[in-house]
Amino acid sequence: MVHTAFLPVLLVSALCNVAPTIAEKQTRPNVVFILADDQDAKLNSLDYMPNVQELLVDQGTHFKSHYCTVAWCCPSRVSMWTGKAAHNTNVTNVETPYGGYPKFVQEGLNDNWVPVWLQSEGYQTYYTGKLMNAHNVVNYFQPFPKGFTGSDFLLDPNTYNYINPIFQRNKLPPVYHTNDYSTDLVRKKALAFMDDAIKKPDSPFFVTVAPIAPHSDYTVTLNIGGDPPYGVNITPPVSADEYKDLFPDAAVPRGPSFNPDVPSGVDWIAELPQLSAENITYNDLLYRQRLRALQSVDEIVKDVVDKLEQAGILDNTYIFYSSDNGYHIGQHRLAPGKGCGFEEDINVPLVVRGPGVPAGKVITRSTTHTDLAPTWWQILGIPLREDFDGMPIPLTDAGLTELEESKRAKEHIQIEFWSKSNPQEYNQDQGLEVNSTYKGIRIVSEDYGFYYAVWCSNSHELYDMKSDPSQMTNLYAASNSTATTSYNTSTPLGRPLSALTARLDALILTLKTCKGATACTEPWNTLLPGEDVYTLAEAMDEKYDDYFAGLPKVEFDRCEEGYIADAEGPVWTEQLEWSEGDFVGRSLSEAGWDVNMLARKGRHALNRP
């Protein structure tokens, strides 16, 4: 019999010998990143995902103005995994020689990307699903992707086969999965990796789940002796059997830009014929199939949350949900695809749930894919890298409130794209090869919004995103017709269109070669050093008119399929010191400025490379 005097001592001893739970042993947070493929933010697909809505949107923060900077799979993914703009990764296409996995390796990025850096910080790293284009059964070991505790990648030529996918696990040979459904396999593999990670509670984890949905189904067929030696049959995505009859009445939203009676856009887009009734019927079928394929991704979200909750670590894990790029279906008479600068292509989903992230909050300030890696570093307590081109997205209630209310929050998104082929997937009546290389700038502000782009053909487009969110009226011609053409004097800008385009052009000029977070996120400091200018509205002051009008304009020397510096016209380069004072309230000549030179603490000049 135990004497009652010893009970407190025994109780303390018993408590000390109880093994701590996983949640108690984990101090650093975990991350699960669920990355869809080609999912739209503008065509309402998130509304058809009940688990995303209930478990992520309602329990986390929805970033409605989140953008990819390249609306194409491989360049976008590499920017996410490096925190760098595509012009700095030099992975600018989906195929060699300018893109794909071989280009990623060639550029030395296999040694310098998120999973490698995370492992050096003590994180377990797991990945399953699609990694990037041109990662295939021939080159998967040349070399193996570095930085993973465990991996199970989809491989070409069957990456986009919903049935019969090919997976390659760790350093084992590829496995062909006959009659298996790709997204279900990704879900099972992800949960197994999470089980492996949870068994090591002393080491936090970062798990990426990358299904192909709602990307279209690509089936590659051999054509031995032919030219080309293979063919690709592109069809709508395939859903799991249990979802094949859902949403029978769903159709592509019929907004103002959907198959318009009047042509819109510039260059080859402005020449597109209207889609036929047959095209539209097919587009609606495609839309329904995309929604159906996403139901299996929605299952992944629920199972991931359940797994974390069962392990007692849901409150110590951030869940990110996004897509590599957006998607258009019939807007501006375009056949289904991506690669354009329209909102459907560049505005993508981003929802975040995790410790300290406010529930049910919606953010309309701009964020980009190049901000994701810096954001992960901040929430995981890792010092930011100097080579990041993005900046951390605040995730606390206080930080998000400050972001929304700040008059000096980042309002620009640099957009870039390289291609010399039709980016459309279903190019009925649109079979001609086209040049789709361009530089763009998207401005997102509470009071105003714009999209401005220069194509490699040197066509220009300018849209007022507040009065014309469907991007139907190109204002660029008006901006060049006369310097006194007035623009919506009820806005804070209230200046001639020519003054507006001069500022937007200067932004692209500095951003198209920017490196590092300061240069890429504070372009006005580059353009107007010491002037305390942070926004487009502030830069529109008429005292800067002569200066901006005198800068070289963005132009291309020729169209290329990838980033080739000598094809891209004037660039911004650093040169001498400038020690004169500021020029507030004075003309440029009075301030000692030469319109061919820009002053900074470290003078800049505009030259061709």
Image: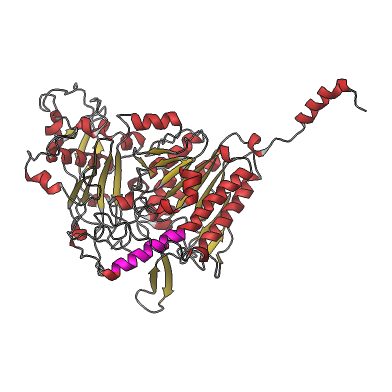
Front one among 320 and 508:
320
Q: What residue do we see at 47% from left, 55% from top? A: 131
Q: Where is residue 174 in the image (x, y as percent from the top left)?
A: 55, 64
The magenta stretch spans residue 61: no
The magenta stretch spans residue 282: yes
Indicate the quadrant where residue 360 lies. Answer: top left
Q: Where is residue 23 in the image (x, y as percent from the top left)?
A: 63, 37
Quarter of the image that includes the N terminus: top right
Q: What residue do we see at 30% from left, 29% from top? A: 407
Quarter of the image that includes the C terminus: top left
Indicate the quadrant where residue 513 lies. Answer: top left
Side of 19 relative to 152 (left or right): right
Residue stretch in magenta? 279-293
Res 215 seen here: no
Q: Main secondary structure of the magenta part?
A: helix
Front one among 481 and 573:
481
Q: What residue do we see at 54% from left, 57% from top? A: 186
